[in-house]
Amino acid sequence: MAKKSNPFPLQKISKLGFYLFLILFYSNCFLRPSGNLTNYDSYFPHSSGTSSIPKGKVRATFLGTSSILLDDGETQILTDGFFSRPSLWKTAFSKIESDPLTVLSVIERAKINRLKAIFVCHSHYDHVMDAPFVAKQTKAKLYGSSSTLNVGTGAGLNQDQMQKFVLGKPISIGKFTVTVLESKHTPPFHILGKTNATDPNHPNIETPLIQPVKAMEFIEGGTFDFFIQHGKNRILIKSSTNFVKGALDNFNADVLFLGIAQISLQPVSFQDEYYKQTIEILKPKLIIPIHWDNFFKPLSEPLEPNLKLGDDFDANMKSILKRSEGQKLEIKLLQGFETIDLF
């Protein structure tokens, strides 16, 4: 009787097991957080912000990535407002869109109930995707580039609820005054053959962008910093780890929200110049790092550092801490929904 052949010979099973092992090994290495937040516990204020805002104070609430809610007890302004945070796999392999239930839950939990303006720093999905939905729900005005406004139009936002950026022109919102400044996006990265570099032939979102769409359809459309005055106090929000040389020469800030994503992946000369063009020039008393968290995880869970796949949180923090050593300034990190009174 003829002996039946084994459809899964041991050699093939061994090879399959080996490849599965490699996949699991590298996934475990690169899809882990790029830092341990317990090592930075002393930098967190651990404040819930449940008390009323003292008169004349400005309270900041961190809502992940570079979404920051500023509140003086009368008026709220928000940067970006990216709350849906779709998973890595969904972002990479399917179309994405705002999740209304998630966005509404963040609006409720963060007590976003007197919002007047949303300023979007650039039009990648992790900044602009939810901004039109937040504007609709809160009746706040959306400020952004032509690309951001095309995201708003695609989401059905009325034209009178949107305003295109005018660089250098102060905008008064309650007791806040916001000036939009030109900046640059973090230097492009390349991961698994993909890049977020802007195609020079298509630098903007040219037509209304109707969600759901692929993540790459959210084109940068220019990157901007926000200089915010409240009485005699000054705030600078820089969401992207880059700079326009000399753009901040005429400014000082009491508080600097500083994008640190991928700073340690850049040459030392870039890190030195970034420090010079931001912290040395602005001379802040307080630095709050932003855009450090893994935005593929829900905001309802404790924030974790960016993935090893494309960042190094520990090295990013060391880059700033080393250069600021001995300086008279304070550095604070904020967890999701954590607050701090700035002045």
Image: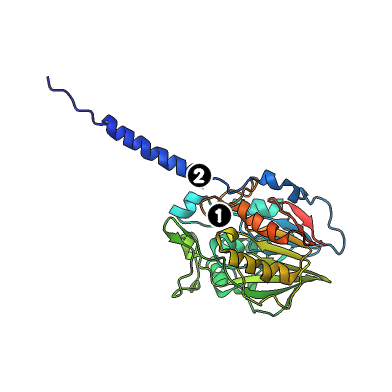
Q: Residue at x 41, y 41 (%)?
A: 22
1 sits left or right of 305 in the view:
left
Q: Residue at x 48, y 69 (%)?
A: 198
Element at label 2 = helix
Name the amino acid type tagged 1: Asp
Residue furthest toward the right? 55
Name the amino acid type tagged 2: Cys
Element at label 1 = loop
Above/below status of 13 relative to 44: above
53 sits left or right of 77 in the view:
right
138 sits left or right of 28 in the view:
right
Above/below status of 3 relative to 32: above
Disc 2 crowd, CA 10 A, few/some/many (<14, 14-19, 20+): some
Closer to the chain start, of discs 2 and 1, is: 2
- x, y percentage for residue 309? 51, 51
Q: Residue at x 71, y 77 (%)?
A: 249
* Nearer to me, 18 or 140: 18
Q: Quadrant of the N terminus?
A: top left
- x, y percentage for residue 134? 64, 61
Q: Which residue is mark 2?
A: 29
* Nearer to me, 164 or 1: 1
Say which quarter of the image contains residue 63. bottom right
Say which quarter of the image contains residue 53. bottom right
Can residue 76 be seen at all in this image of the molecule? no
Between the C-alphas of marks 2 and 1, the distance is 12 Å
- Residue 311 disc label: 1
- x, y percentage for residue 29? 50, 44
* Nearer to me, 114 or 70: 70
Above/below status of 267 relative to 337: below
